[in-house]
Image (cartoon, rainbow, N blue to C red):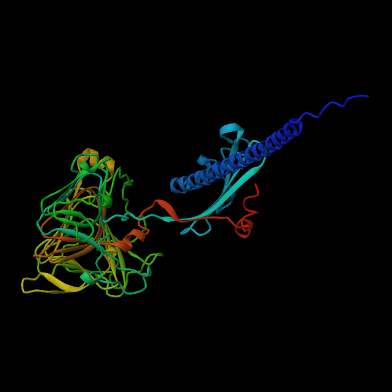
Amino acid sequence: MTKESPMHPQQPQRGSVLLTALLLSAIIAISLVSYLQITMNSRKLAQRSFYANAAMNLVDTGVEQALWSLNQGNWTGAGFTAVDATHWQATFPTSSTYFQLMQGVRGQVKVWVDQSNANRPHAVAKAIITLGDGSELVKEAEVYMRKRSYFANGLVAKNSITFSGNNAAVDSWNSDPDNNPGTAAVPYSSGVAHDNGQIGSTSVQVDSISVSNADIYGYAAIGTSDLTGISVGPQGSVGPYGTANGDIDATHVTYDFTTSFPDATAPTTSGYTLPAITGATTLPRAGDLPAADGGYYYSVPSISLSGSGATLSIGGSSANVVIVVTNTTGTTVSTTGHGGIAIATDSSLALYTSGNVAIAGNGVVNGTFTSDNNGNLTSGTPNQPASFAVYGTRSSADAATNGLQDIKIAGNGILSGIVYAPNASLEMKGGGNSGQVLGAAVANTVTVTGNSVFHYDESLADASSSNLWGLSKWRELASAADRNAYTSQLNF
């Protein structure tokens, strides 16, 4: 009889262990594959996110090319070609070359520019990023341009800003809060004052802004990379309302401040030629006709007003007067004693001169005021500061040869106006014990003297006062409807 071999007692246990091991290995393998898949997907998403940002950078590159061409008045130099008299298009780097990115990724940007509205040109840029696998990422944006303001900051100097006087101060208000020049201007008062006053110097010298004992209720921009570019005295301060004496609130200081200072140039519009203005004069004269832009243009050798009644009166019926002073040396505009300039409500005066300016005495009455017993203007309703403008037209080349233009403007109590004179030494002083200077100014050096309080008009930041274009609106075209609106324009 054959004897059966007994079953080994550990065989079922060994089979269970093997099966468990196989199951665990399968689970680990599946987990590893899933993990690798997740990792690959995450990598792809990260790559697409990275290059989506790169595409937006290319969009901005195209916009910058359009803005440069607009400011230079040179489209072909940047690679644009004319579609018609008011439209331009270009592909950057070129239609047959690409920006070479990493890992074989490449990109192009197409730009279409519309100048049919000369006051508000706009452009559309479309960036296409081609990834290594041949897939594409597309970003588009639409921008509108307008001429920038010289007065984005209240007091700006190429070099130094100096405050002198224990009661000097800087704050701000907005004379046109609804951004509608047709509505009545809001006069400055403590009830509408803000701590958004702004001063700035592009100089990299130590103490290029000397606040001394003035109070800057707002912000300062300095050319240095640290606080060495600005100093305050024991009674001075820089910052919001409530900043302690002797303190500078570092959060209200911008470092490495730079800006451009293009030379001011006189308008070339033909108008009327007058002899030197030395006595009572009213402009526009009866019978004078405005130019096509509505302004009354006059050329005069000089303006010198000093005697009793020697007043240059501007307007009376919403007149915009432009005076170009043709003498280029010496003091070409001056008021002293009882002489002065009076600008009627709703009228304006723009002075262009490369000579020196010394406005004192009755100074410039920009609006309607009342006087105290000493003849100081104490109250009233000033026009918006933009209604009185002084443009110093001495060029940087002329200043390097013959020295800076000298501009001194004072008034009996209240001075409302703006000054753009990048190659001038500017001194501003309100009269009386609490003189007020309202507006904004740009010069090579700025000195605020006496007890003047400088009120920056925030509405000037929106004034298109320069010949340089900047962006007024930027938006990404993210939806299909937005992109479809420009399909034909970008089909090149």
Which residue appears farthest toward the right when viewing the image? 1
Which residue appears farthest toward the top when viewing the image? 2
Residue 189 visible from this viewpoint: no
284 is higher (above) or lower (below) than 155: below
**Going by the image, does 94 lie left or right of 365?**
right
Query: Is 450 or 49 nearer to us in this picture?
Result: 49
482 is higher (above) or lower (below) than 34: below
Residue 319 visible from this viewpoint: yes
234 is higher (above) or lower (below) than 417: above
Residue at coordinates 64% horizontally, 43% vertically from top-left? 136
Total marks shown come to 0
Which residue appears farthest toward the left when viewing the image? 374
Residue at coordinates 32% horizontally, 51% vertically from top-left? 265
Which residue appears farthest toward the front when viewing the image? 1
Question: Where does residue 415 sit, x and y in percent of width and height?
Answer: 19, 64
Question: Where does residue 219 sit, x and y in percent of width and height?
Answer: 26, 54
Query: Is 341 or 205 nearer to us in this picture?
Result: 205
**Going by the image, does 255 lie left or right of 292?**
left
Residue at coordinates 62% horizontally, 42% vertically from top-left? 38
135 is higher (above) or lower (below) than 303: above
| The N terminus - image quarter | top right
Question: Where does residue 155 sit, x and y in percent of width and height?
Answer: 24, 54
